[in-house]
């Protein structure tokens, strides 16, 4: 089970909590330095301000697009796709992960295929998905669902397989039924792994969604950036970069908060 | 962050190279290219310039390399604009609207030589859709790759019918992705160049409108654009580049070379008969098709492009159309090549 050990490692690494409040000052150094460097590059005058847009230009683009409601519309469309796709993908991933973890037959049958597909970037499926699903909402929801399915399935699988074997033996002695086994033992024991899986799925799904919107969409934050690129409105492109980065950061942060609350409850 | 810093530094030093007077090592010309027999081939005048080899020789005499930079039609103008803004390319033969976008976006360009008389734009609907006019497409999905030259004629059509872009669901996909979208019904219609005729021939779509039914000025145009800083600092190199394009135009305008021009234009892009049909449709005499003359119609066209794009909010700053035109190189080339009077002065008004 070399792959499992490897996957564990990934989850452990990405799952390590990083506390902002512990580093109040130093965490602002990088973004501030970046801003300063950016502004400095603009001041050199090597490129006209439309090409190398200064931070203030991007702020103005953000303000203008917020005032016109354009930004909210794009962000709203993207978040709606994320929510629907994520719920579908995460639930399916959990069910699948639990199935291959609990049944050796299912594991033997599905896990090689699953581990192969997991290695394929979701974006590689886009042309085929456009053929079958068109370029409307079902396509984008499906992209999100697929992107969240894999990390979720893996996390669930590892979470359940991580439950010590003797706990199952205890369950057997107490003659717990499947439902009770899930409720009394599996659920509490796998909550941390599953929450980590949810967080990874969510942030990964967001990145993939923005990329898919760049390729084919009529709205959404990715499409806003693509349109900006095509019409050479670099301020709009950069505004999109900042907004999508910020949303990704907040999604991750929110999920970590839930994760830490949940694990606190568990240790209490 | 280190990455960003290095990009910025690379960007600055790159531009330094390109602009230092007399320090030019390469002249880079970007243009749409098509994959053909495992290579990227340039069609139109770019292909002829490469074939003739004259430009490469002349630049080599000055110790300057010639690089043709291929751009896929799936990306087109926006990629060329990024190249111009990063000062990575010096010339590009490409469309009117993307060039206006670049100029409005703070990348000054100049038209140093016209490369044709405009191309027709087609509105097609997917097979089986009973629409016969733009009005029938209200509320339907139309594939339109934004920022490409065919956006303006389409926008003018929409206006002329008293409609708005919002009356349709505009789907921003490139021409390469369009046939699959039409076939699967993901889009109901598409705005295209001569690919529209190709899709009709293949039975995927049906042409319901083209710029042939509109005033001559609605056709999209392409020219040889030069980066203003480069043209200003290196008029000698610009003159050689323009002369090469005028030579190529003269060769292409010869009726005897018509079959080969059509054959070369078709390479990797579409069947020869579609190119021939598109050419025949336009009613432009063969001799005038590749005319490099700065006709009054050319000036009017760029005024119209600049005003219209600004009025529609497609560009955010006014483009000075007069400042865009720089006819001194073509005039000189015609004189040097003794081609004055070879092309008519007002070809476009003939239609």
Image (cartoon, coloured by chain):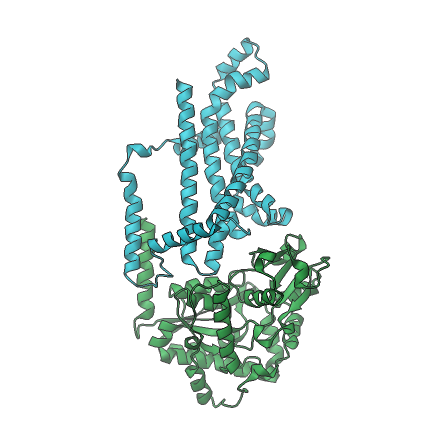
Q: Percent x, y for residue B333?
A: 44, 85
Q: Quadrant of residue B73?
A: bottom right
Instruction: Answer left or right for B95 relative to B64.
Output: right
Residue at screen point 71% across, 57% down: B129
Q: Percent x, y for residue B85?
A: 39, 64
Q: Is residue B339 above or below residue A23?
A: below
Q: Is residue A59 above or below residue A144?
A: below
A17 or B31: nearer the viewer: A17
Q: Percent x, y for residue A119?
A: 51, 40
Residue A162, can we see it? Answer: no
Chain ID, cyan in image: A
Q: Number of callouts in the render?
A: 0
The C terminus of chain A lies in which quarter of the figure? top left
Q: Percent x, y for residue B67?
A: 43, 70
Q: Quadrant of residue A249?
A: top left
Residue B182, can we see it? Answer: yes
B107 or B18: nearer the viewer: B107
**Which residue is farthest top?**
A173
Instruction: Answer left or right for A102 relative to B310.
Output: right
**Which residue is farthest left?**
A25
Q: Is residue B140 above or below residue B158?
A: above
A27 or B175: nearer the viewer: A27
Residue at screen point 54% across, 47% down: A124
| Chain B shade in the render | green
């Amino acid at each position: 089970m070399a792959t499992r050990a490897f996957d564990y490692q990934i989850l452990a690494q990405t799952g390590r909590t990083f506390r902002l409040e512990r580093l109040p000052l130093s965490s602002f150094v990088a973004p501030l330095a970046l801003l300063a460097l950016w502004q400095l590059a603009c001041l050199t005058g090597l490129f006209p301000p439309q090409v190398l847009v200064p931070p203030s230009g991007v702020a103005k683009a953000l303000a203008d697009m917020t005032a016109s409601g354009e930004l909210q519309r794009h962000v709203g469309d993207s978040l709606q796709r994320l929510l629907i796709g994520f719920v579908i993908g995460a639930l399916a991933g959990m069910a699948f992960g639990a199935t291959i973890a609990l049944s050796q037959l299912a594991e033997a049958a599905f896990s090689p295929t699953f581990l192969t597909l997991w290695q394929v970037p979701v974006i590689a499926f886009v042309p085929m998905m456009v053929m079958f699903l068109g370029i409307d909402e079902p396509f984008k929801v499906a992209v999100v669902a697929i992107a969240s399915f894999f990390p979720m399935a893996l996390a669930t699988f590892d979470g359940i397989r991580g439950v010590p074997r003797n706990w199952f033996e205890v369950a057997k002695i107490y003659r717990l039924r499947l439902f009770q086994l899930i409720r009394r033992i599996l659920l509490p024991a796998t909550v941390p792994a599953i929450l980590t899986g949810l967080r990874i799925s969510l942030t990964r799904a967001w990145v993939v969604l923005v990329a898919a919107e760049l390729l084919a969409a009529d709205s959404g934050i990715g499409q806003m950036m693509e349109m900006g690129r095509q019409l050479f409105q670099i301020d709009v492109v950069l505004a999109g970069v900042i907004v999508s980065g910020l949303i990704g950061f907040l999604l991750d942060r929110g999920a970590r908060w839930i994760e830490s609350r949940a694990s606190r409850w568990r240790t209490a | 962050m280190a990455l960003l810093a290095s990009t910025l530094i690379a960007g600055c030093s790159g531009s330094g190279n390109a602009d230092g007077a007399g320090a030019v090592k390469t002249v880079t010309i970007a243009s749409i290219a098509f994959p053909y027999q495992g290579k990227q081939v340039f069609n139109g005048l770019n292909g002829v310039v490469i074939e003739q080899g004259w430009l490469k020789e002349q630049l080599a005499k000055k110790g300057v390399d010639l690089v043709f930079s291929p751009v896929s039609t799936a990306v087109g103008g926006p990629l060329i604009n990024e190249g111009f803004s990063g000062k990575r390319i010096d010339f590009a033969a490409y469309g009117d609207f993307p060039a206006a976008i670049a100029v409005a976006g703070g990348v000054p360009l100049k038209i140093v030589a016209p490369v044709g008389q405009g191309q027709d734009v087609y509105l097609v609907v997917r097979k089986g859709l009973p629409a016969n006019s733009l009005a029938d497409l209200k509320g339907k999905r139309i594939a339109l790759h934004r920022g490409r030259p065919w956006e303006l004629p389409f926008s003018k059509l929409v206006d002329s019918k008293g409609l708005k872009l919002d009356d349709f669901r505009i789907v921003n996909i490139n021409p390469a992705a369009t046939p699959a979208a039409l076939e699967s019904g993901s889009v109901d219609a598409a705005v295209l160049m001569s690919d529209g005729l190709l899709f009709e021939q293949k039975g995927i779509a049906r042409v319901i409108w083209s710029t042939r039914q509109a005033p001559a000025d609605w056709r999209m145009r392409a020219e040889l654009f030069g980066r203003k800083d480069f043209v200003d600092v290196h008029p000698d190199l610009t003159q050689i580049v323009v002369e090469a394009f005028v030579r190529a135009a003269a060769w292409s305008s010869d009726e005897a070379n018509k079959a080969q021009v059509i054959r070369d234009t078709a390479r990797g892009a579409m069947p020869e008969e579609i190119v021939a049909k598109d050419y025949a449709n336009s009613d432009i005499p063969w001799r005038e098709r590749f005319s490099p003359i700065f006709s009054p119609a050319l000036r009017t066209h760029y005024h119209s492009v600049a005003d219209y794009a600004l009025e529609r909010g497609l560009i955010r700053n006014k483009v000075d159309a007069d400042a865009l035109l720089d006819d001194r190189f073509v005039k000189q080339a015609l004189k040097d090549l003794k081609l004055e009077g070879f092309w008519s002065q007002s070809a476009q008004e003939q239609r």
